[in-house]
Amino acid sequence: MKSEAQLAESIDRFQRVFWGKQSDGRPPVGVVNRGIFLPIQYLRREFPRAEVKPEDVRSEWIMTDYEFGFAQPLVSCDDWIPFSAPWRGIPWIEAWCGCPVRFSTGSLAPEPAVASRPALAQAPLPAVNEWFECLSRQTRMLVDTAPADCWISPSILRGPSDVLAAMRGLTGFYCDLHDDASVLDQAAGRVNQLLLRALDMHYSIVPSKRGGYGHIFGYWAPGKTIVIQEDVMGMCRPNCYRDIFRKYNAAVVKHLGAHVLFHLHSTGFQHYRDVLSIPGLAGLELTVEANGPSLTDLVPVMREILERSRLILFVDQGIEQLPGVLRQLPREGLYLIVLEQHIHSDDEFRRLVNAGWNSRLS
């Protein structure tokens, strides 16, 4: 468990350097177990059937995020803000829109629920209100049982393009995008209203803690926050995002406020400038993966983002390049996430910080 002094120091660093974009001190750095991004590992036992139902989501079957990843961390002096969220193994918005949640050993996935483009136009949204009720129950339970150093985050709540791709299946979605994108546009507006309802529900239940809110990316924010994701847009030309889905993301920013960010993968981020143009967007989160450009090759992009906005940089791959890269990036508006598989102790954490910013750990 993190001490009161540790939490206060990390929150101050998020407040000043990340949100305030001040140059006083180093940016916040979080160290996290890779397993928290694979929530199927949270299962205490396997589900008894192939389709998961809302009544199956209960604590005797599923560990919380805090139990799994934060009760006994390898690194204790980093800035990661511990969290719990309604179990991220459930694709909440997709299930609410009617996608069956299929389970097999080691995986969970939404099953397509809409067979054709005309059927999408007529699909009832929401379709299965029991999933929304389950999400609300899980949120209340986590608030009631949160440890002192744990913030309650929104779960993964995917954006309209990802939800529609789940409803139609990837092939159907991309064909719809080519054949008649207006049907997707209309459905995306309805899906986005559900996303806003889910966010309003969350923040009606979850109070601020130490003057702000936590998130599954381990940061503290002084206001209501979410990281939007539209991952299927990584396979499309930027104009597909710009012409259809950007306005719905802009509506989320307008609705929730000044602390909304957007998640991108290094394997498909070509629309990042269109994302940055969303009025009031707080910044981008970039996950650097093995199959995309190297961390070093991404330096010009990351500099551009930091000059225009803020950047959460999650280094899943390329840790050996990181110290040299950090020396080329502005520190103002940056938050760095690394894996504890790469940083095994407090001493290794301090060496990373010193190598990146040539300063002692503060």
Image (tube, rainbow, N blue to C red):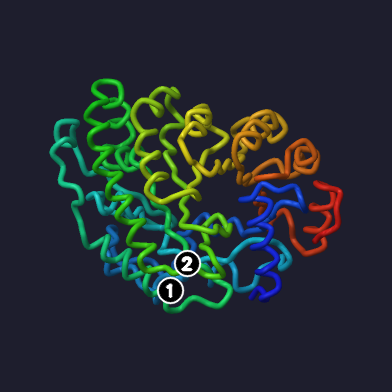
Q: Amino acid at mark 2?
A: Ile
Residue 157, image x, y percentages: 39, 51
Q: Quadrant of the N terminus?
A: bottom right
Q: Tell me if I can see residue 103 in this picture.
A: no
* Residue nearest the viewer, comparing 141 with 307: 307
Tell me the residue at 34%/58% (across/down). Answer: 200
Question: Is residue 12 rendered to the left or right of residue 86?
Answer: right
Residue neighbourhood size for the residue with mark 2, other residues' Cα within 10 Å, grouped as few (<14), some (14–19), many (≥20): many
Mark 1 touches mark 2? (CB < 8 Å): yes
Q: Amino acid at mark 1?
A: Val
Which mark, by number, is residue 152?
2
Where disc 2 sits, the SS reads strand
Q: Tell me if I can see residue 212 in this picture.
A: yes
Tell me the residue at 24%/23% (across/down). Answer: 180
* Residue nearest the viewer, comparing 107 with 358: 358
In the depicted structure, whether residue 80 falls above or below residue 157:
below
Tell me the residue at 66%/42% (across/down). Answer: 317
Residue 238, image x, y percentages: 45, 24
Residue 308, image x, y percentages: 61, 34
In the depicted structure, whether residue 307 falls above or below residue 361:
above
Residue neighbourhood size for the residue with mark 1, other residues' Cα within 10 Å, grouped as few (<14), some (14–19), many (≥20): some
* Residue nearest the viewer, comparing 54 with 134: 134
Where disc 1 sits, the SS reads helix
Q: Quadrant of the C terminus?
A: bottom right
From mark 1 to mark 2, how far is it between C-alphas? 6 Å
Q: State the residue position of label 1.
A: 143
Residue 335, image x, y percentages: 65, 49
In the depicted structure, whether residue 40 falls above or below residue 282:
below
Question: Is residue 342 rendered to the left or right of residue 264?
Answer: right
